[in-house]
Image (tube, helix red, strand yellow):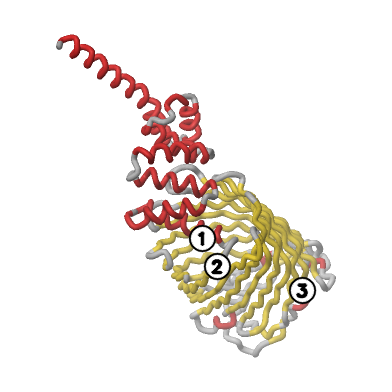
Amino acid sequence: MIRRSLISAVVVNLLLFHSAVWAAPADEIRSLLEQNKAQEAYQLGRVSPELLGDPAFDFFYGIAAIDAGHPGEGVLALERYILSFPDNGDARFQLARGYFILGEDQRARDEFETLLPNSTGNQKIAIERYLDAIRTRESRYQPTAKAYVEASLGVDTNINAGLSSGATPQIPGLGTLPAVSSNSISAREQDTFLTASAGVQGTYPVSPGVSLYGAGGVDARRHLGSNNDVFDQHSLGATGGVSYLKERNLYKGGAFLSQSWVDNQSYLLSYGLNGEWNHQLDQFNRLTLGAQLARFDYDDMNIYLTKDKAGGPVLSVLTDRNSDFIGISGAWAHALAMPYQPVITVSGNYGEESNQRNRADLSRDIYGARVSFAMTPAERWGVSAGIGYQENKYRDIFTAGSERRHDTSWGLDGSVSYFYTKQFSVRAEAQILDQGSNIGLFRYGREVVSVKARYEL
């Protein structure tokens, strides 16, 4: 009896020691994951291949492998874990995420839809977003359609990009101009505005990986201040083309058309061609390159020179601004493997606008760059912010004795969104713009704040 008890004690101790040894790497991997060090956690797991098959190890190693960009290994580990613990919802969520990254959309959908009825909080939001992404990817196989309506109320401190009342703009070579009258149409005007917009978009697959796409929309902006109706705007736009998806690359080519009106008068017709290439480097990084050819056709308008509309309208010869445009752009989007799902996007662009009337003073080279940041800090909430820079270099002087116009502008923007439901959201936005110019007539500042409500069908 004593001998049997001693043997039992030794076996128990060996088993406890064995479990502790196996648990240690799993605990270390978990600790690294909690510190958002997925790559380190994955590498730690790889040096312990003898632990594959242990449920605790498989669970954390599977998550680490997926987060580190090795979803195939992660899926295999989590599938082994679920054989032992089929009711673990967290494991099934991570497994579904791995399926999604591997492009196994049907298996990912099955797992997500099984989890959705009992999910809450951030996991529920994440599942809904994954299911939306799966539906988007499935658009390569079946037709899709979406529609939206949106309305907003806001305040704009400079609706006409005007100069401060009393300002005395400088023009190199010509000296100082008379002070801007407070009644001038060029004087800075602040007002409250309302906007409304609606649109539709859809895709139609024609063969594996090849789809037709199209979108159209209408929007309008109305100012509430007396006599500011001359700044009211509305527009119609449409775009369409063909897309081709192959492995990690998405190619798009199409055409666009847009017509805008100011004060119920035709202002600008723009149309052209565009192309885009998207390359998904991995689950964290995406590259985008784009190109555009466009024509801008302006219409002459009857405008007022004073805010009280005294003296009646005069004809503004805008057709002198008709131009052709060619531009390229590029962007890099990087998703950080950490809480709140932050994404950083860096982009740049270059364009050339060439006047059709041989007005080199209205032709320009355009340079721009932007950095933006977006994240989900809490359930149903979204936050984004960005800063952008643009430089316009005009190609000739606009009058004898002056200088070539050179504008630089900085813009800062941010928004906070709340999703009451998957379809209905409210968003608060703020924008600050500061434009400098060597020609004082084009130097101004502007701030805009608004609250928007949006419903998607």
Q: Are marks 1 and 2 in contact (CB under 8 Å)?
A: yes
Looking at the picture, which amino acid does disc 2 mark? Thr
Q: Is residue 299 above or below residue 78?
A: below
Residue occupied by mark 3: 322
Name the spot of residue 258 as percent of width and height, x first. Answer: 66, 74
The image quadrant that residue 388 belongs to is bottom right
Label 1, label 2: how far apart the Cα atoms are: 9 Å
Looking at the picture, which amino acid does disc 1 mark? Arg
Q: Nearer the viewer, residue 196 or 434?
A: 196
Q: Which SS class for mark 3?
A: loop
Side of 252 where 400 appears, left or right: right
Q: Which SS class for mark 1?
A: helix
Side of 334 where 405 appears, left or right: right
The image quadrant that residue 29 belongs to is top left
Mark 2 or mark 3: whose residue is earlier in sequence:
2
Q: Is residue 370 above or below residue 80?
A: below
Looking at the picture, which amino acid does disc 3 mark? Asn
Please tell me which residue is depicted at 58% across the width and 46% down the height of the picture.
285
Q: Which SS class for mark 2?
A: strand
Front position among marks 2 and 3: 2
Neighbourhood count class around disc 2 (C-alpha, 10 Å): few under 14, some 14–19, many 20 upward: some
Q: Is residue 348 visible?
A: no
Residue occupied by mark 2: 144
Label 1, label 3: how far apart the Cα atoms are: 42 Å
Residue occupied by mark 1: 135
The image quadrant that residue 51 belongs to is top left
Name the spot of residue 124 as percent of width and height, x first. Answer: 38, 55
Mark 1 or mark 2: whose residue is earlier in sequence:
1
Mark 1 or mark 3: whose residue is earlier in sequence:
1
Please tell me which residue is depicted at 49% across the width and 76% down the height of the picture.
194
Please tell me which residue is depicted at 74% across the width and 76% down the height of the picture.
297
